[in-house]
Amino acid sequence: MKIYLDGNYVPSEEAKVSVFDHGLLYGDGVFEGIRVYGGRIFRLDQHLDRLFNSAKAIMLSIPLTREQLIEACCETCRQNKLKDGYIRLVVTRGVGYLGLNPFRCKNPTVFIIADRIELYPGEVYRKGLKLITASTQRTNPAAMSPSIKSLNYLNNILAKIEAVNAGTFEAIMLNAQGHVAECTGDNIFIVRGGKLETPPVSAGALVGITRQVVIELAAKRKIAVSEPNLTRYDLATADEVFLTGTAAEIVPVSSIDGRIIGSGRPGLLTLKLTEDFRKLTRSEGTLIGAK
Ligand code: PXG
């Protein structure tokens, strides 16, 4: 496998980052997880918008232009003959000294991994995913905005540990007010009375690309979407619940904290949107190009 690392395509065994890289020492950096379907990169523009916004929020200047990043993503896929898979684009603060000061790091490190991915077993998509509510609160937006897709994932990992300990794959995270924010690596939607609802970004959700795509798909079907604050009660009593994420795509939820959601099987609207999503991912995207 070849990895893009600071301008070069190197074998994965040689793709190494310094122990003085602040991405490692402090989780100081940003990233994107992007999907490739049938030789096209899905929603690359939106991922790059979010990457540049995350970088701006932490005063990190990405040493490549947008066009250079597009070319590097495409070339990493070509180098690995990857037509369907996952691109992990990471920009760290770079090598520095001990001590937090990010401005003593002169050269941000950029690397891109293009690989295969399967987040959940196929059964989850057929039968639905069981969720728990984590006791770990989602990071307070006033402390660090969950809109920044940073290399600091410990908040999410603590909740993920709760999910795994409870024998499942995902956990719902609430904010300090007790409102639903999102899951550890996915956004959440409910269906109520034929309408879609998803927590507002201000509740502590990442501005998910897949979340945005689902909102667009719903609009095409003339399905109303709103972004109210949601409680655990709203989830437990919803007709359908599903998760969205680049890696996970659209995941039906069958139960939450032991409460069966709807029929306990993937809901009708969830299945329709999944079908729309599948069609869309195969019909648009940035062509990687032939090698
Ligand atoms: N919330 C969080 C906290 C995430 O990390 C999403 C929502 C969904 O957003 P997108 O834009 O993907 O629809 C994410 C997505 C990885 C990895 O290993 C990244 C995510 C999730 C799972 C794995 O790169 N981020």
Image (cartoon, helix red, strand yellow):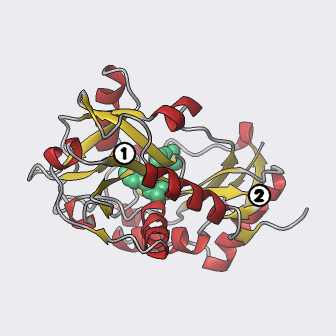
Mark 2 secondary-structure assignment: loop
Choose the circle earlier in sequence order: 1 or 2: 2
Name the residue type under label 2. Gly
Residue holding disc 2: 38
Residue 223's spot in the image, x, y percent? 39, 70
**Residue at the spot x=47%, y=71% of the render?**
221
Q: Is residue 27 visible?
A: no
- Which quarter of the image is occupied by the C terminus? bottom right
**Residue at the spot x=26%, y=62% of the render?**
145
Badge 2: how crowded within 10 Å, few (<14), some, or many (20+)?
some
Q: Which mark is residue 153?
A: 1
Label 1 CB less than 8 angstroms from ligand 1? yes
Residue 264's spot in the image, x, y percent? 36, 34
**Residue at the spot x=16%, y=63% of the render?**
142
Mark 1 secondary-structure assignment: loop
- Which quarter of the image is occupied by the N terminus? top right
Q: Is residue 167 above or below residue 31?
A: above
